[in-house]
Amino acid sequence: MEIIPAIDLLDGHCVRLHQGDYDRVTRFADDPVRQALEWERQGAPRLHLVDLDGARSGEAVNDAAVRAITAALSIPVQLGGGVRSRDRAEDLLACGLDRVILGTVAIEQPTLVHELALAHPDRIVVGIDARDGRVATRGWLEESSTEATALASSLVDRGIAAIISTDIATDGTLAGPNLGALRAMAAAAAPVPVIASGGIGDLADVLSLLALEPLGVQGVIVGRALYDGRLDLGEAITAVGPARWQDPPVDGDTAFV
């Protein structure tokens, strides 16, 4: 399982929102490149960027920071937030990003998701952000009538690299992941890998996801717990390292080595 540190960008700064609320912002750092290099130094296999300005307004406010980060790092970088057109997705990929994450467009333009995935194999991810099981769009400011699991099922044959499943109710709260929602998402998305996002508060929360790894939850995005010092990135990476599972499981049960 990949432990993926997150940097949320708002007007060029590293921040976190509480449950997606733009009025409840905590600013953690003024230099996103320096922060990105620190996560790489600590062993991050991948970096997750969120363009909060893009998600809210669709404006490319943070592109200079994105280019600087991708130029400075040797690990792959993915970004989501405001990617709502073919041109925008391809511009971002040209900035050096390994993957771009589509959110709102997955509901509004599902054909575009498939077209981009075909044109850029293993570089298109869909972010499904849910509140009470329903998909929220446009930076979580609008709520659709679409069930998150139904959207995931519709994406199975679209050629995407992964689904990032975010539970808005737990995001930024440090209260622990919504394991039930993640289990349902993994079942709906199979065989597309699922990356968990939202609620991670400590190492125990990370380890709780290991039971879902055989179901398809292959990564977890962590933000506030790292910035608050509640979770050590290196320790977490070591804890979920190789040789965790017996192969094959006995009678369909998951067993720890």
Image (cartoon, rainbow, N blue to C red):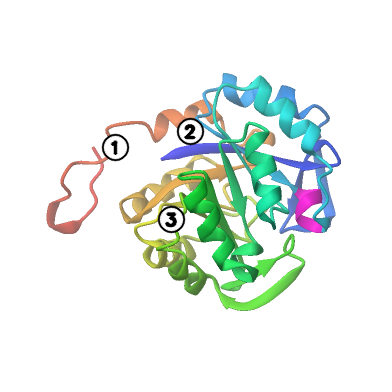
Alpha carbon of mark 3 to alpha carbon of mark 1: how far?
Answer: 29 Å
Q: Is residue 93 above or below residue 144?
A: above
Other-residue count near label 2 (Cα within 10 Å), few / some / many at <14 / 14–19 / ≥20 = some
Residue highlighted by disc 3: 159
SS for dot 3: loop
Residue 181 point in image, percent of width and height: 48, 66
Work out how far the residue at label 3 is from the one at label 2, CA to CA, in angstroms.
30 Å
The residue at which mark 2 appears reads as 236
* Residue designated by label 1: 244
Question: Can you give x and y, in whole percent of width and height, for residue 151 in the image?
Answer: 51, 70
On the rendered structure, is 255 left or right of 137? Answer: left
Q: Is residue 248 left or right of residue 205?
A: left
Q: Are marks 2 and 1 in contact (CB under 8 Å)?
A: no
Type of the residue with mark 1 = Arg
Q: Nearer the viewer, residue 190 or 82?
A: 82
Q: Position of residue 202 (x, y in %)?
A: 55, 42
Disc nearer the start of the sequence (3/2)? 3
Q: Residue at x 40, y 63 (%)?
A: 157
Kindly state the secondary structure of the residue where label 1 is placed. Answer: loop
Mark earlier in primary sequence (3, 1): 3
Q: Amino acid at mark 3?
A: Gly
What segment is highlighted magenta in the picture?
52-56
Q: How many discs appear? A: 3
In the image, is 204 to the left or to the right of 215? right
N-terminal label among 2 and 1 = 2
Q: Main secondary structure of the magenta part?
A: helix
Q: Quadrant of the C terminus?
A: top left
